[in-house]
Image (cartoon, rainbow, N blue to C red):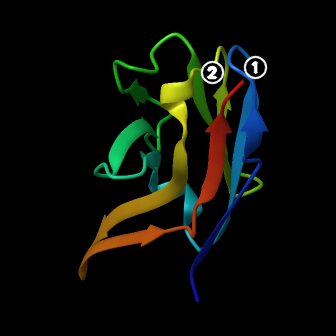
Amino acid sequence: QVQLVESGGGLVQPGASLRLSCAALITMFGEYTMAWYRQAPGKQRELVATITTGGSTNYADSVKGRFTISRDNAKNTVSLQMNSLKPEDTAVYYCHAERWGAAGRYAYWGQGTQVTVSS
């Protein structure tokens, strides 16, 4: 049974920081590319940041320089450090895991954690 469990969301003021964490109850965690997505009300889910098995990272233009994704393969966790938060960062943030194996693509989602940036 695969589970991705996000935590760390909340209500903060503009300019504040939050750190999201995703605990992955998953075997072969180190072989998964991990990512954070977000979905704001009335909008499509969008990719925020990815981190590969080798530690390479990629970010959406809207969060570059403010957000940092990291992973700890020993603890099966992936984190998203969010600094200088803006109201437009308000969304439900989802953890995502993906790998390709002999049987095809394996992809999983967490249940999401709400981030609200408001004064």
Residue 73 in view, yes or no: no
Disc 1 to disc 2, C-alpha distance: 6 Å
- First reached walking from the N terminus: tag 1 or tag 2: 1
Binning the other alpha carbons within 10 Å of mark 2 as few (below 14), some (14 to 19) or many (20 upward) gives many
Q: Residue at x 62, y 34 (%)?
A: 70
Q: Position of residue 76 (x, y in %)?
A: 69, 58
Q: Describe the element under mark 1 as helix, strand or loop.
A: loop
Q: Position of residue 77 (x, y in %)?
A: 69, 53
Q: Residue at x 65, y 14 (%)?
A: 84
Residue receiving disc 1: 16
Contact (Cβ within 8 Å) of mark 1 with mark 2: yes
Residue 100 in view, yes or no: yes
Q: Describe the element under mark 2 as helix, strand or loop.
A: loop
Q: Nearer the viewer, residue 19 or 16?
A: 16
Query: Label 2 sits on what residue type?
Result: Leu
Q: Residue at x 28, y 51 (%)?
A: 44
Q: Position of residue 23 (x, y in %)?
A: 71, 61
Q: Nearer the viewer, residue 7 or 85?
A: 85
Q: Position of residue 78 (x, y in %)?
A: 64, 47
